[in-house]
Amino acid sequence: MGILIDVKNLKKYFEIRRSLLSKPTYVRAVEDVTFQIPEGSIYAIVGESGSGKSTLGRTILRLIEPTSGTIIYNGQEITRLDNKRMIEYRRQMQIVQQDPYNSLHPRKLVKEIIGEGLKIHFKMRPDEIYLRIKEILEMVGLREEHMFRYPHEFSGGQRQRIAIARALVLRPKFLVLDEPTSALDVSVQARVLALLKELRERFSLTYMFITHNLAVVDYMATQVAVMYLGKIMELGSKDDIFQRAAHPYTLALLDCVPSVGTGRKIRSVPRGEIPNPAKPPSGCVFHTRCPKAQKICQEKEPEFYELSPGHFCKCHFCK
Amino acid sequence: MIGTFIVIGFILIAIFAPILAPYDPIKPNLPQRLKPPSSQHLFGTDQFGRDIFSRVIHGARIEVWIIFLVTVISGTIGTAIGITAGYFGGAVDEILMRITDIFLAFPRLILAMALSAMLGRGLTNAILAISLVEWTVVARLARAEAMKIKSQPYIEAVKAVGASNLRILLFHVLPMCLSPVLVQLTLRMGTIILTAAGLGFLGLGAQPPTPEWGAIVSDGRSYLVQQWWISTFPGLFIAVVVLGFNLLGDGIRDILDPRLRR
């Protein structure tokens, strides 16, 4: 199993200027992120809102330009490719966005939305395009006649299926799923997740699954990275994170998962709000909310400690 | 409602002008000069004996032509500049919007006068001059729309699929900007007539003997005290039609903006 996505020291800062003359401040949405996505895995990125997980996904696809760092896709560095050379990789790396109500052009027919990529990448005759769209619609659980409808005629779950069809019609290898089910009803969520699992088998896809829902991570993921304020705090296999979590932030997140009927009490909800990413805390960024925080946490940023092969944790006390 | 009736009437007059007008609007008829309104000449005649009623009716065609061309030209320039500035942002936006600001810094009629004086007299040049003044409003609006639309997830999705900037701009951003731009253009039609009539009155627009309304008003200037009818009737037509367009524009805005609807 090779490495499909190799991200090194990736940073994305957003500049904020109050006025033309004032000094710009930077929101550190992604701060020095390094990790690898093995081919065929479902790599979950979890964290609270504002932790930079969506920005990370969009930066890897170069929908937002990175501030610094490198992104290597299948052995090829794509960080600085110009638009023309990037097109081939666009076909191989697709995204399914969070909100299916905003991700489909309101004035276009479903066949135009799905067919757009086919027109750009393949010199296909209209009847071939038609067949490809029909085929992909059936794979995501929609029907041929849905092609001639507008997005507003569909429910949220159906819209998300259209968005999945748009991404998969190009036969990509890598798919970023940016909270693909968080805008959907719980009953619909399960079916969309099952569909995504099935499609991954069928097309041998690799997923980067961005979510804040740990139950979904448990169901889907093979690997997990936990993000907080633009940094990865802990990463490892699903079992590493769910059975042997070492970072206090990961433990706090796991404790927040509500479960029905087990009688498990919520022990340590992270105190307070996530700090302003324009003014991150000194030392370990989590020390302001950490139950184990000591003096060293304010002064020194912890290294990554490898607890077991592939299981890394960024905390002074996780050894 | 009233606005719609006035505008429809105006367009019908323009279409059926040759049938409605009893006399030739251009051919002089000196024995009949400066006749007051009567059953023969409904609005009287001018200093060359031409029937004012016929001239005003044929004038409607000229006004429709002016509105049409100015709308198309200024709409195209304005939308193109506006969505380019709004979509690309940054330096492109700064440059294009500062150019727009330069045009906006002058009073409209003064700028239109200067431009048409520069281009030379005549109807075509007047149309160009008015278009060059009018596009700024459209550009501002199209820019605002494009800025709003470019940050929508569906535009990002098209980018992810591999569409070039030009493709996104033309096929995805442009269609979404079109309807507010069209409403704005309708709202501006009254102003276009006023500017055209102003230029005609000053002798910078349509040249004699073209029966443009502003030019006819200007024809009657030196006779205003004794032969009031020459200037009064085309002036009334300008006023009514501008009012009609403004009422229509307000109506369209109310329909499209649900907050104003009760």
Image: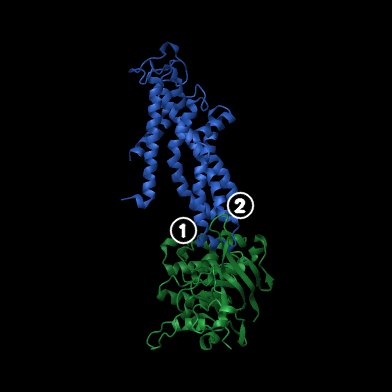
Within-10-Å neighbours for mark 2: few <14, some 14–19, many 20+? few
Helix, strand or loop status at disc 1: loop
Image hue for chain A:
green
Which residue is located at x 58 percent, y 64 percent? A64
Within-10-Å neighbours for mark 1: few <14, some 14–19, many 20+? some
Q: Which residue is mark 1?
A: A106
Residue A224 in sight in this render:
no
Residues beneath discs 2 and 1 located on the same chain: no
Residue B167 location, x and y as percent?
58, 55
Which residue is located at x 36 percent, y 48 percent? B255
Please, which colouring scheme is shown? by chain
Which residue, as the protein is rendered here, is positioned at the far left?
Answer: B262
Q: Which residue is mark 2?
A: B91
Residue B225 in sight in this render:
yes
Residue B143 location, x and y as percent?
52, 50
For this rendering, which residue is in front, A307 or A218? A307
Q: Quadrant of the C terminus of chain A?
A: bottom right
Residue A166 location, x and y as percent?
53, 66
Please name the amino acid that badge 1 sits on. Pro
Chain appearing in blue on the rendered image = B
Q: Quadrant of the N terminus of chain A?
A: bottom right
Helix, strand or loop status at disc 2: helix
| Label 2 chain ID | B
Q: CA distance from mark 2 to mark 1?
A: 30 Å
Please name the amino acid that badge 2 sits on. Ala
From what the image shows, is residue B187 above or below residue B235? below
Q: Is residue B161 left or right of residue B29?
A: right
Question: Image quarter for residue A56?
Answer: bottom right
